[in-house]
Image (spheres, rainbow, N blue to C red):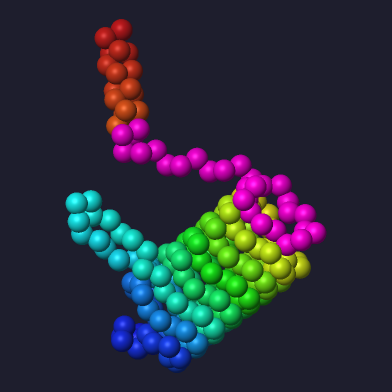
Amino acid sequence: MESHPIHTLCPGADLRDADLSGRNIGGANLDGANLAGANLSSVSSFTFVDGFVSRFEPNPVTMSGANLTKAILTNARLDKADLTHADLSGADLSHVSLREARFEQARLENARLSGADLFRANLLNANLRHAHLNGVNLDGAFLEGATLIGTNLQGVYWTDETVWPRGFTPPPSREPEEPPPTRWEQLVGRSKETLKISYRKKG
């Protein structure tokens, strides 16, 4: 794959088989770009905000109408991305974060989204025929009018806020994952374990 400088990321760009892995493409406009077969694994779209509390905030990328057939987007962080009318047929989006992303009328036939986070994503009229959505987070996702023929929905997580196509009966939702312990909880747990060890030694 060929590596491309960041300034080539523009509407209608020809980025077939390009290697963009690991890059921060936040704010890029790739509307109508040809990214067929491109490697976008581990890309991100965040901006570092330095202030009283330094933080990373989403800087959404727009890829409306882009050709992403068989592209690799594994482990990418593209929250709030605009993928309306994009063609992601056969693309690999395993474990990608696409929270609140837009997929209206996108093509996702045979796409692999195993373990992806689609929290509140808009999949209005998206074509998910034979796509792999096993283990996906669909909490609050909007799938009105989506095509789910032959779609693998094993182990998906969904809630009362998830909107399914009319007449579609979804599989039972898996149990929600417990959030990882906070730093404070880790310290408290470590302190408790230390006290237990000290007590055993004294005893």
The residue lying at 63 percent from left, 58 percent from top is: 134
The answer to whether 57 is drawn above or below residue 182 in the figure is: below
The residue lying at 68 percent from left, 54 percent from top is: 154
Q: Residue furthest right?
A: 167
The answer to whether 5 is drawn above or below residue 122 in the figure is: below
Which of the 4 image quadrants contains residue 78?
Answer: bottom left
Assess whether residue 182 is covered by the magenta stretch: yes
Assess whether residue 40 is covered by the magenta stretch: no
Judging depth in this view, the residue of 200 and 80 nearest the camera is 80
Give the magenta-colored segment's residue range. Answer: 158-186
Dominant SS type (magenta): loop
Total numbered circles: 0
Which of the 4 image quadrants contains residue 111?
Answer: bottom right
Which of the 4 image quadrants contains residue 90?
Answer: bottom right
Judging depth in this view, the residue of 61 and 136 nearest the camera is 61
Q: Residue 92, image x and y in percent?
A: 55, 71
Q: Residue 137, image x and y in percent?
A: 57, 54
Q: Residue 4, image x and y in percent?
A: 34, 86
Judging depth in this view, the residue of 176 and 115 nearest the camera is 176
Instruction: Left or right? Give the position of 56 relative to 84.
Output: left
Q: Residue furthest top?
A: 203
The quarter of the picture where the N terminus appears is: bottom left
Q: Residue 192, image x and y in percent?
A: 33, 22
